[in-house]
């Protein structure tokens, strides 16, 4: 027999009322706001319009899918549940589909979770939850049915006005489930789906991002930091900050590998290490000067070699938009800070100028100018091989550098950020000098 279930107590406010008080101009403004609440001051706990951030507000205009790609802790579940709640309370007889990876997730997260529908609904609008029927019913007759992406055929036949798709990036049958869900939205003039998920580079997410009628919202855990334990934010940032998993799971970034790339994301993650970093027997700074003062960055990478012959990426001091004197000063500072044995600078663009500004910044700089005999990708291949052998490690997160490395593809093409892989090129110069030696490096680096 079906049973009615409801979580007790109101949802926790996203921030304490005390934290909001400074937003009132004075005591009179606060008193006026309080009087407006009437006798039920606690009603503000259930007023999502009061608590939501702009990036949790439904988009305006004509849209079919609101795709929320955001990191964990952003408030995706709360946003999806509050949208469903608002639509259900506003529209008698509404038919709703709630779709998760499996029925257990649909019930535990979308319905009964801390940000689920039962928790968020005020006492004067109780929802009847019938687990055996996978159904929720509002007092006005609006009804939501739970579905599992593990059984996409279960969406054949039913008809709905709107839907909430949770964590669709992890659905095993993503395309089939989405297609059946979309075809079930045959009721009402404006069928809509809200999809809340941590991004993953799967075909369904790529497809939704490209489809006409999709409105995309991106977000990070940091956007909701006020409503999360400080210890949790600090721990997650300390452990995962700058890593691929952190960029995906915390920052909500969609990170993909380029076909034919010399570096993959998995290869970069394998190179990542944590303290302690061993003592260096040599330190080299690679410099890839920009062709001008606009646009491209000056790549400045500090790389060391330990006693075991392994290379270590120690610092990325690259800078964009600086004058030659500006980036030369940074090179000199890093050379002194790291006690560099050598600075290797590409001289293809203005060789005399490069040497002049570096000497002016530090007259005794241990400088070696090199010219590129082949393209950037060709020069990078033997350095990528060092990574594949497990001989290069990243001692510090270098997000821009890693994106550039993963954008260098076989065939000489570049698919990374910016017009040119300046950081990656500086790294290649430094590691070639440091680890490949003159014999192996000679075909790719021709000293001036």
Image (spheres, grey):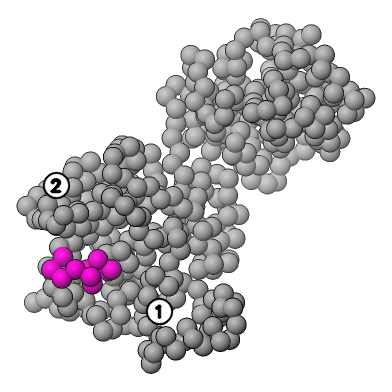
- Dot 1 surroundings within 10 Å: few (below 14), some, or many (20 or more)? some
Does residue 186 sit above or below 360 in this rendering? below
Q: Magenta residues, as a range?
A: 85-94
Q: Residue 392: percent from the left, percent from the top?
A: 63, 30
Asked if residue 87 lies in the magenta stretch, the reply is: yes
In space, the residues marked 2 and 1 are separated at their CA atoms by: 36 Å
**Comes first in the chain, label 2 or label 1:** 1
Q: Residue 409: percent from the left, percent from the top?
A: 49, 21
The C terminus sits in image quarter: top right
The N terminus sits in image quarter: bottom left
Label pair 2/1, CB-CB below 8 angstroms: no
State the predominant SS element of the stretch in magenta: helix
Residue found 46% across the figure and 53% down from its top: 219
Residue that protrudes farthest toward the right in the picture: 363
Using residue 437 as the reference point, say whether residue 418 is left or right of it.
Answer: left
- Dot 2 surroundings within 10 Å: few (below 14), some, or many (20 or more)? some
Which residue is nearer to you in this view: 256 or 103?
256
Q: Which mark is residue 210?
A: none
Residue found 51% across the figure and 46% down from its top: 247
Using residue 387 as the reference point, say whether residue 301 is left or right of it.
Answer: right
Q: Which mark is residue 183?
A: 2
In the structure shown, which secondary structural element does the residue marked by tag 2 occupy?
A: helix
Using residue 262 as the reference point, say whether residue 328 is left or right of it.
Answer: right
Asked if residue 364 lies in the magenta stretch, the reply is: no
Residue that protrudes farthest toward the bottom in the picture: 39
Q: Residue 424: percent from the left, percent from the top?
A: 62, 26
Q: Which mark is residue 45?
A: 1
In the structure shown, which secondary structural element does the residue marked by tag 1 occupy?
A: helix
Does residue 271 sit above or below 36 in this rendering? above
């Amino acid at each position: 027999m079906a049973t009615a279930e409801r979580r007790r107590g109101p949802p926790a406010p996203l921030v304490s009322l005390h934290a909001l008080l400074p937003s009132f101009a004075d005591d009179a403004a606060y008193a006026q706001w309080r009087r407006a609440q009437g006798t039920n001051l606690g009603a503000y706990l259930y007023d999502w319009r009061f608590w939501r951030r702009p990036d949790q507000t439904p988009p305006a205009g004509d849209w079919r899918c609101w795709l929320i790609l955001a990191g964990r802790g952003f408030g995706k579940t709360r946003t999806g549940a509050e949208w469903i709640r608002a639509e259900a309370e506003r529209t008698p007889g509404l038919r709703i589909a709630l779709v998760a990876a499996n029925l257990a997730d649909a019930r535990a997260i979308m319905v009964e979770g801390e940000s689920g529908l039962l928790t968020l609904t005020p006492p004067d609008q109780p929802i009847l939850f019938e687990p055996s029927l996978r159904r929720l019913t509002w007092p006005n007759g609006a009804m939501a049915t739970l579905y599992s992406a593990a059984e996409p055929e279960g969406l054949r036949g039913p008809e709905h006005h709107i839907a909430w798709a949770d964590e669709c990036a992890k659905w095993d049958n993503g395309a089939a489930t989405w297609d059946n869900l979309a075809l079930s939205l045959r009721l009402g003039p404006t069928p809509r789906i809200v999809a809340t998920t941590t991004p993953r580079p799967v075909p369904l997410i790529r497809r939704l991002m490209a489809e006409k009628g999709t409105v995309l919202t991106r977000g990070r855990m940091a956007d909701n930091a006020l409503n999360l334990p400080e210890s949790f934010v600090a721990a997650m940032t300390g452990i995962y900050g700058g890593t691929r998993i952190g960029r995906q799971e915390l920052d909500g970034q969609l990170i993909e590998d380029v076909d034919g790339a010399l570096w993959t994301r998995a290869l970069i993650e394998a190179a990542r290490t944590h303290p302690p970093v061993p003592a260096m027997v040599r330190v080299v700074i690679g410099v890839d000067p920009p062709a001008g003062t606009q646009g491209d960055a000056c790549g400045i990478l500090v790389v060391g070699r330990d006693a075991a012959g392994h290379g270590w990426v120690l610092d990325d001091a690259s800078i964009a938009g600086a004058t030659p004197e500006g980036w030369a000063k940074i090179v000199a500072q890093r050379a002194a800070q790291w006690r560099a044995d050598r600075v290797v600078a590409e001289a293809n663009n203005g060789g005399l100028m490069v040497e002049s500004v570096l000497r002016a910044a530090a007259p005794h700089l241990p400088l070696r100018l090199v010219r590129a005999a082949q393209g950037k990708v060709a020069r990078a291949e033997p350095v990528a091989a060092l990574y594949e052998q497990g001989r290069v490690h990243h001692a510090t997160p270098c997000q821009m550098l890693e994106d550039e490395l993963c954008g260098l593809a076989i065939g000489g093409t570049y698919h990374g950020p910016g017009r040119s892989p300046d950081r990656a090129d500086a790294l290649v110069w430094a590691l070639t000098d440091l680890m490949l030696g003159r014999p192996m490096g000679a075909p790719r680096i021709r000293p001036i």
